[in-house]
Image (cartoon, rainbow, N blue to C red):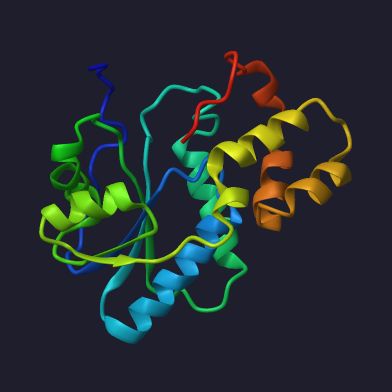
Amino acid sequence: MEEYSLKPLPPNDVIDSCIVVLGRFQPLHLGHTSLIEAAEKWRLENSAESQLVLCIGSSNKPESMTNPWNYNEREEMIRLWLQNQQGFANVKIVSIPDIDNPPMWVSHAEKYHGKDGSFFTSDSFSAELYKKAGWNVVISPLEKRDQYEGWRVRATALMLSTINDDEAIRTVLSLSLPKSTVDYLIKIDGFRRLAFLVEGGEPVG
């Protein structure tokens, strides 16, 4: 098993009784935002006193076509999107490094997002891990899964990575990404880097 540094370290202000949404957000796309909106609606209806915690996974993985944007950039994508939304008054964003050890994942992640809450997800594998760890798991169907899969979004962005027409990029990627994400990645040249990260094929995930 390849070893990675635990970057970042767990925060000091972990709060238990939370509603957890976990994703890699590579990048933040409309499937993610739909899931976050559904989680917030569920929180307000079922556990309004709990905090919504958005967890960015793979924070310690090296830059690659699978992981082109670092966790600080992904956190900024989420923050920019939240700024344009109504509500979301009780939300926290944390980044969690991978340990490549599924049986130990939940106990590791709890150091970052807290314990004794509900795990809100559309991913069956993650759902099973949290169920085995004793969490309440809420399954939400992912809308337009074939369109919003992360690898598909990155593949589309890769095709646009050498185009010097920001409006063309906005037109194509607005079908799968929030406007705030597209604008931010254009601003930091976040699409252009993809052209230098091609490794002979985009892996699924």
- Figure check: 63 above or below 122: above
Q: Residue at x 54, y 62 (%)?
A: 143
Residue 2, image quadrant: top left
The residue most toward the top is 200
Residue 78 pos. (x, y %) = 52, 55
The reply, left or right, for residue 129 in relation to residue 26 is: left
Residue at the limit of the structure toward the front, as seen here: 146
Determine whether, in the image, residue 48 is placed left or right of residue 149.
left
**Left or right position of 189 against 121:** right
In this view, 22 is above or below 85: above
Q: Position of residue 196 (x, y in %)?
A: 66, 16
The answer to whether one can see residue 68 in this image is yes
Give the vertical position of 15 relative to 75 (above or below): below
In this rendered view, identify the residue nearer to me: 104 or 143. 143
User: Which residue lies at the image location 70% right of the left edge and 48% below the top edge?
Assistant: 182
As drawn, which residue projects farthest toward the bottom? 45
Residue pictured at 42% horizontal, 79% vertical:
41
Q: Position of residue 190 (x, y in %)?
A: 66, 34
**Quadrant location of the N terminus?**
top left
* Observer able to see residue 190: no
Q: Quadrant of residue 38?
A: bottom left
Q: Position of residue 31 (x, y in %)?
A: 55, 57
Total tally of numbered discs in the picture: 0
